[in-house]
Amino acid sequence: MFPPIDEDLVLDEAALAISLKLTEPTEVEADAAAYSIQQAKLRTEEDHRLSLAEKKKEKVRKQIEALRAEFGKVAKKNNRAEQHLQISEDDF
């Protein structure tokens, strides 16, 4: 009923549309635009998440810096105290 299919003949979408005499544009063009819009949205969301993560990291870094400064003050105070009042590593 149908002629045999030639395996070596490869038709791209444009050739297929011409051979089928399609007058309306295919959905591939719309999908490509939707895909790029979706990609842009995903990239924007990812950039936002990365920005929030960097802000959180910076906040933690500042907290660590403050704790280190406080520890330095306490360590100096401990070293200046009399021997029987000092806290040593053995006390932990």
Image (tube, rainbow, N blue to C red):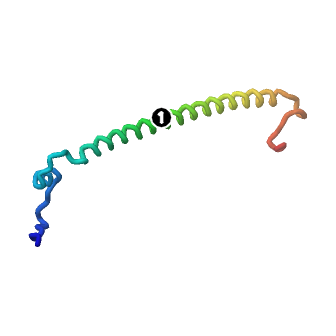
Q: Percent position (x, y) of residue 65?
A: 64, 30
Seen from the viewer's position, the closer of residues 25 and 33 is: 25
Q: Residue furthest right?
A: 84
Mark 1 sits on what residue?
48
Category of crowding for the residue at label 1, using alpha-carbon neighbours closer than 10 angstroms: few (below 14), some (14–19), many (at least 20): few
When asked about the image quadrant of residue 58, the answer is top right
Q: Is residue 66 above or below residue 17?
A: above
Residue at the location (90% across, 34% down)?
84
Residue at the location (84% across, 43% down)?
91
When asked about the image quadrant of residue 12, the answer is bottom left
Residue at the location (88% across, 29% down)?
82
> Along the horizontal axis of the image, is 63 left or right of 86?
left
> Along the horizontal axis of the image, is 4 left or right of 64?
left
Amino acid at the residue labelled 1 = His
Q: Is residue 26 above or below residue 37?
A: below
Seen from the viewer's position, the closer of residues 12 and 91 is: 12
Q: Percent position (x, y) of residue 44?
A: 42, 35
Seen from the viewer's position, the closer of residues 68 and 44 is: 44
Q: Percent position (x, y) of residue 81?
A: 85, 28
> Along the horizontal axis of the image, is 77 left or right of 49?
right
For the C terminus, the image quarter is: top right
Residue at the location (50% across, 37% down)?
49
Q: Percent position (x, y) of residue 70?
A: 73, 28
Seen from the viewer's position, the closer of residues 24 and 18 is: 24
For the N terminus, the image quarter is: bottom left
When asked about the image quadrant of residue 85, the answer is top right
Q: Secondary structure at mark 1?
A: helix
Q: Is residue 47 above or below residue 31?
A: above
Q: How many marks?
A: 1
Q: Is residue 69 above or below residue 49?
A: above
